[in-house]
Image (cartoon, rainbow, N blue to C red):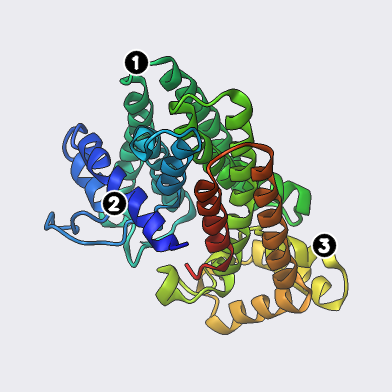
Amino acid sequence: MDVTALLERGRTLATPVLRAAIERLAPPMNTVAAYHFGWIDAHGNPADGDGGKAVRPALAVMSAEVTGAAPEVGIPGAVAVELVHNFSLLHDDLMDGDEQRRHRDTVWKAYDPAQAILVGDALMVLANEILLELGTAEAARATRRVTTATRALIDGQAQDISYEHRERVTVEECLEMEGNKTGALLACACSIGAVLGGADDHTADTLEKYGYHLGLAFQAVDDLLGIWGDPVATGKQTWSDLRQRKKSLPVVAALAAGGQASERLGELLAADAKSSDFANFSEEEFAARAALIEEAGGRDWTAEEARRQHTIAIEALDSIRMPEYVRDQFAALADFVVVRKR
């Protein structure tokens, strides 16, 4: 199964509708949004930027095929989910102070924080408009799922921020936060095309179970990349999550492991939270913390958790009927999520 082709199909089908939605925005929000999506540079010139992995649009289009519908049936859902996802990215980059995304300045850095907030808000509203304009019962059901997923996503971001100011977070709390922040919207992407295609609630809920656990696997891999990822591949700084004092899964698992490395890590992170010089830490200081996380077992535990969540996601597919080639697509995309490098 060619996963690259699946991702490209979702992107190709969704992008014209996504561009049309962005054109509805009042200036300069339409320009700022176009920059965020990589369609133009900061000077307004056409660009062929990295628009992201397009996992969610691919899932939405695939889910329409579960019902036997044409993939095009899932396009409004694909666009709605992509709009919500990018609303969250615009706001997250500002809240986290991230200056780089996809190898260039984030919106708040290239323009200003106010534009990042306004454009993010506009994208969230557009997501509902795109679905409700269909005027069908299926569209209303799909909108309800998008709204519920968006609220969970916001809950997850609030949890993420609050955890940055706590010395300790449990593994269970971290998984709950990541289930909200990442799992909920991926779950919605996996069901929304099927809902638009007329799927019953059992089918949609089961696809959401697949997507939720896929989201946890996705986020576990993201957490690994947030510490040990290659900046050339990720487009972010080295040790990016450590610089933001994120209580990501490797960190939380390492702190919960016990032992000398775990205790030393806890002491360092507690001191970091009180340090007035944290922003000026050297590469070596962040590398030392990453080494302690790995020594305490946080890296291995997170990699195994990604594989465990992947298994649960795949097993969920067995409880509903769908064409075999569609199941193979879902399985292939799940495999891609746990082996990606960015």
Mark 1 or 2, nearer chain start: 2
Residue at 82% in and 62% down = 256
Q: Name the secondary structure under disc 3.
A: helix
Residue 197 point in image, percent of width and height: 44, 28
Mark 2 / mark 3, whichever is N-terminal? 2
Dot 1 or dot 3: first in sequence order is: 1
Please report the residue visible at 16 percent of the width from the left and 37 percent of the height from the top.
27
Q: Tell me which amino acid carries mark 3.
A: Ala
Residue 120: percent from left, percent from top: 36, 39
Q: Tell me the mark number nearer the camera, choosing from 2 and 3.
A: 2
- In this view of the protein, which residue sits in the foreground, 75 or 215? 75
| Element under disc 1 | loop
Real-space CA distance between mark 1 and mark 3, rounded to the nearest whole angstrom: 50 Å
How many marks overall? 3
Which numbered dot is residue 37?
2
- Secondary structure under tag 2 reads loop
Marks 1,2: beta carbons within 8 A = no
Query: Along the horizontal axis of the image, is 176 left or right of 237?
Result: right
The residue lying toward the viewer, choosing from 78 and 250, is: 78
**Residue found at x 32% / y 56%:** 51
Tell me the CA gap for discs 2 and 3.
39 Å
The crowd level at tag 2 (other Cα within 10 Å; few <14, some 14-19, many 20+) is: many
Q: Name the residue under label 3.
A: 256
The disc label shown at residue 135, or none? 1
- The amino acid marked with disc number 1 is Gly
Q: Residue 328: x and y, percent?
A: 54, 53
Q: Nearer the viewer, residue 135 or 249?
A: 135
In the rendered image, the residue lying farthest to the bottom is 284
In the rendered image, the residue lying farthest to the right is 259
Q: What residue type is labelled 2?
A: Phe
Nearer the observer, 166 or 311: 311
Task: State which quadrant residue 135 falls in.
Answer: top left
